Amino acid sequence: MTELKGSQRKFLRGLAHNLNPAAYVGQKGITEQLIEEINQALDASELIKVKFVDYKDKDVKKALSDEITKAVNAHLAGMVGHVIILYRQHKDTAKRLIKLPK
């Protein structure tokens, strides 16, 4: 996948506005179970939110966000407060729910 453009990230943030978090990062940090949960949620809906419960420092959240996006092969569409928005296009073109603007 190519890197998302600014307009595409903005479009995805708008779509994610009404979503509830699909996964929560707690005091245990990033675990195999968390990665599996995020992978399943991305396979089901392509666009999800992940909330940081026990991490308040922006630099720590950024580092964890980068680690999560690499582990699940997704794009970071945005970070708002303690929530990140992840996007991963479905592998099957017939099952793709989101059409990104050019």
Image (spheres, rainbow, N blue to C red):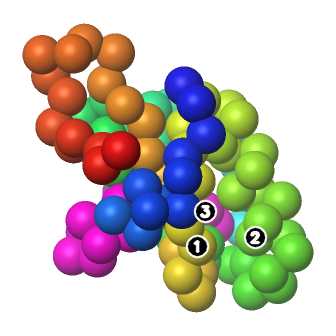
Return the mark for residue 25: 3
In this rendering, the answer to whether 21 lies above or below 29 is below
The image position of residue 36, as x and y in percent, is 50, 32
Q: Tell me the SS state at disc 2.
A: helix
The image position of residue 41, as x and y in percent, is 34, 41
What whole-number distance in Å separates the C-alpha atoms at marks 1 and 2? 9 Å
Pointer 2: what residue? 61
For the C terminus, the image quarter is: top left
| Labels 3 and 1: the sequence-earlier one | 3
What whole-number distance in Å separates the C-alpha atoms at marks 2 and 3? 10 Å
For the N terminus, the image quarter is: top right
Q: Tell me the SS state at disc 1.
A: strand
Q: Is residue 44 left or right of residue 25?
A: left
Q: Amino acid at mark 3?
A: Val
Pointer 3 local density, CA inside 10 Å: few below 14, some 14–19, many at least 20? some
Residue 93 can be seen, yes or no = yes
The residue at 43%/36% (across/down) is 88
The image position of residue 39, as x and y in percent, is 45, 32
In the image, the segment drawn in magenta is 12-26
| Labels 1 and 2: the sequence-earlier one | 2
Q: Quadrant of residue 71?
A: top right
